[in-house]
Image (cartoon, helix red, strand yellow):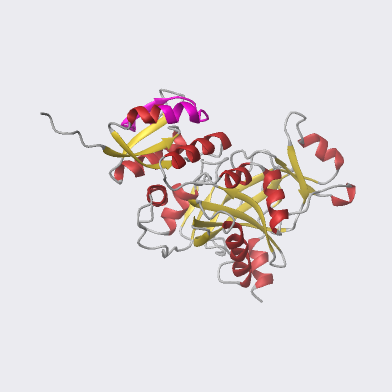
Amino acid sequence: MAGKKNKRDAVVSIGAGVSQLAVIKAAKEAGFGVIAVDRDAKAPGMPMADAAVVSSTHDRIYLLKYLEGLEKDWAIRGIVARTSAADALRTALAASRKYGLPGLDEELISISTDKSALRGFCGRRHLPFPARACSARDYPVIVKPMVTIVGKTGIYLCGDERALRFCTDPEVFVEVESFVEGIDVTCLYLAENGTAKALTWLDELVGVDIGGRIKGLGLSIPSVISGTRTETRAFEIIKELVSSFPKAAALLLVSMRITMEGEPMLIEIHSDLGGDLIGDELLPAACTGFDFFSLAVKVATGASIETMTWPFRPAAVFYSEEPPGFTTLLSSDIRSNLIRIPIDGLSKGPRHLEWLDRNMT
């Protein structure tokens, strides 16, 4: 009689496009088979997969049924979703729940992908968030798409009603909030059992072009707030945030606006395993041997993580165009006089050095 066939351990990748290649590669290097899900049978990650599911990443019912048919050959050990699409993240959540695996939370997905949901969440839990603009007295204002898009796409600084009318699309729901003078920073952390463990802070280098469009210029590590009282206050906010999701286990990024006086407020939560070259370029440049996507696979599969402390050294990435294009990767951070942010066509540039001068004296 033939022996019983052993199942292979597999990780399911929600998506097999360019953005998912890094997590697919990391899963395979960790010894897992990969089951890739994408509606495009010719998606670049499909040839790397051990099993391909040609289906929309938004169709969780179809996927769960399809995975049941694969269970005779595969033991599902993790679900990874490098995407900002709410429905795709909900597909990942449904799969992680079905197989009892680490994953996100329904409300966490909602506040990561919908600005109005995040505002409501912060209001209920008394977490600082930029005020909603309600009248002409509130100009200048920031206009953001209600639903998260890639990078800073669709975000504008408007100085008056005319500018507001010019930059808003009647077909797109937007969030309009008061502009806060300050700097943008991001924290990468692990959320697990309602607690948060910080890996690092980084600076988001942001400018405003002459048309009012917010432009991502690059990233810098370590952040200018690292080691300051502002970092302590900011992380207290993150810990309060994470305590609301005791069942979630995931690598997350939180973006904050820090006022020039050092007061932090939430502006975005990212549950999409990072974009803008954070995991692809910046973190590996700042720490030799650090593999963000390998860590993401470990978290998704519930594997033991030996350390949460890495020796990140100064590094910076400058974009040559909207991410993922970049021209310069420097072994230095924004504090260095070697760094020059191009200001051609910008009405506002990054103010991180000014912030540092104000808050370190």
Give the answer, above or below, for where 244 lies relative to 42.
below
> Is residue 46 on the magenta stretch?
yes
Quadrant where the image shows the C terminus = bottom right
In the displayed structure image, the side of residue 133 where residue 187 appears, left or right: left
Q: Quadrant of residue 27?
A: top left
Quadrant where the image shows the N terminus = top left
Residue in the foreground of this view, choosing between 221 and 122: 122
Give how far across and how far down residue 144 sits, in percent.
71, 42
Give the residue drawn at x 63%, y 62%: 237
Give how far across and how far down residue 36 sits, in percent.
39, 32
Give the answer, above or below, for where 322 lies relative to 125.
above
Give how far across and how far down residue 147 sits, in percent.
65, 38
Give the residue drawn at x 30%, y 46%: 30
- Range of the magenta residues? 45-65
> Is residue 127 on the magenta stretch?
no
Give the residue drawn at x 41%, y 65%: 311
Q: Quadrant of residue 225?
A: bottom right
Give the answer, above or below, for where 94 lies relative to 201.
above
Residue extending farthest to the left is 1
